[in-house]
Amino acid sequence: MLAIRLVAKCFLVLSLTSVTQSTWAQGSPGWAEDLEFLLKSIDEIHPNPYGVHSRESFITAASNLKSQHSELSEHAAALEIQRLLAMVGDGHTEWARMPESLRGDYLPIIFRPFVEGWFIRTGDPAYRPLFGKPITGIAGLAIQDVLDRVLPYVSGENEIGKLDDAANLIRNARVLDALGITDGIAKTVSFTVLESDGSESSIEVAVTDESWVQPHWRDVDKLLNPDVDEPLYRLLDGNYACSWLPDDQLLYVMFSEIRNDNDSTIEEFFGDVYEFASVVRPSKFVLDLRENSGGNLDLNGPVLRGLIANPEMDQPGKVFVAIGPDTYSAAMNLSVLLERYTNSLFVGTPTGATPNHYGDTRVVELPNSKIQVEISELAWQNSDPRDDRPWITPDIPVNPSAALFIAERDPVLETILDFSPPESLAEEFGPPMARWRRQNQLQEEIWPALLSASARPISHVEGGRGLKVESCSVR
């Protein structure tokens, strides 16, 4: 069993800190009242709050928190509220917004996991020596040890989906203090990286109040490879966009958010896409959901219906759905429907949510701290009721590579372009309704490099091949 899974399943073990105390966190009746109100709300609202941990475990965790209240700073206490929410094992049950006590101190970098390890995707160019190198340690702790402390505070349904949120918590200096990773709210945090020769080097990163990407920040790939063209998926703007690759006879749709754009609705856009497809008759159709974390699931209908209504295109080996950790919520619902009712092949890394999951949250406010939390109140069962997979596993797995990212390459699209379906494809994958049953659906042996925090030097990779791209508008 994977180490991260063990961490994610563990019971509540308190993280204590002795920073400046607040009245709310020092054991006034308000602290206990908030915990009781939270447990009562979870119990009343969530359809299945004790699927991962028993009700007794929640009660014990809350009781331990009550008894330790005097040792918690206000921001540490707020973080413990999130840990109780994370015990539900549902990605939608979490803070509605980050509590005020945890805001104001951030590291000016954004980093994510790749098969070579964790590395910075964008950040303040003042820290260029860190760019393009796997992170091996933070504040003197190995990156795996940091993750082990952070992951129990991340709401989610599987290990893949939790990693991005874990990275966002790690760049919060108040979180690092609350977890004992730093001694107090640090003004600088040391990052250790792996050099190409296998040695390690460290640099201090100054904490700022910049909570998200700033205009002067630079993407690592653009900074290290300024003369290479960006991959197609990063060139397209808006919630959805379409491109036609005539030389490859491939129709590509980037679908990044399930919300209507100002220029056209989802129904209008996909109506145009499928009309264009009926004219050009593509050999391959790609629906890219890798960066789609959801939206309004009521808008999914035109996407699914249009594909089903086009039997010439909806054939094994012709339709590809690109997925990854950010494929979540309403985009997860769409993925499951495509898996169940079409001949789509899934390409990329596992989805960030389970096929059957909980969502449609209700926001409640804790009476004393005023922390707002959201709790799922609906069970979405778009797949078979017996489907307990932690994710949709790609039919064609493609691990995210930092080397390819830096080289401005898109390994998912390249894999699809190079894919030649075997004659036995239809028989091998069987009818769509039964695909969730396939043996080796989890393929967990493929993902350890992504799920662990082990690091290896990032090798040099040449830029990708040029693609001839045209508009696919029929208007």
Image (cartoon, rainbow, N blue to C red):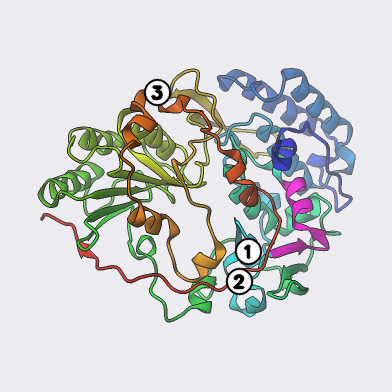
- For numbered disc 2, what is the local secondary structure? loop
Mark 3 vs mark 1: which is more N-terminal?
A: 1
- Image spot of residue 158 (x, y percent): 60, 37
Q: Is residue 475 above or below residue 85?
A: below
Mark 3 vs mark 2: which is more N-terminal?
A: 2
Q: Which residue is mark 1?
A: 119
Q: Is residue 226 above or below residue 208?
A: below
Task: Report whether 472 appears left or right of 17.
Answer: left
Does the image show residue 210? no
| Amino acid of disc 1 | Phe
| Amino acid of disc 3 | Ala
Is 114 within the magenta? no
How far apart are the two marked residues, 1 and 2, measured between alpha carbons?
A: 7 Å
The span picked out in magenta is 135-150
- For numbered disc 3, what is the local secondary structure? helix
- Image spot of residue 361 (x, y percent): 51, 31
- For numbered disc 1, what is the local secondary structure? strand
How far apart are the two marked residues, 3 and 2, measured between alpha carbons?
A: 42 Å
Question: Contact, CB < 8 Å: mark 1 with mark 2?
Answer: yes
Is 149 within the magenta? yes
Q: Residue at x 86, y 37 (%)?
A: 69
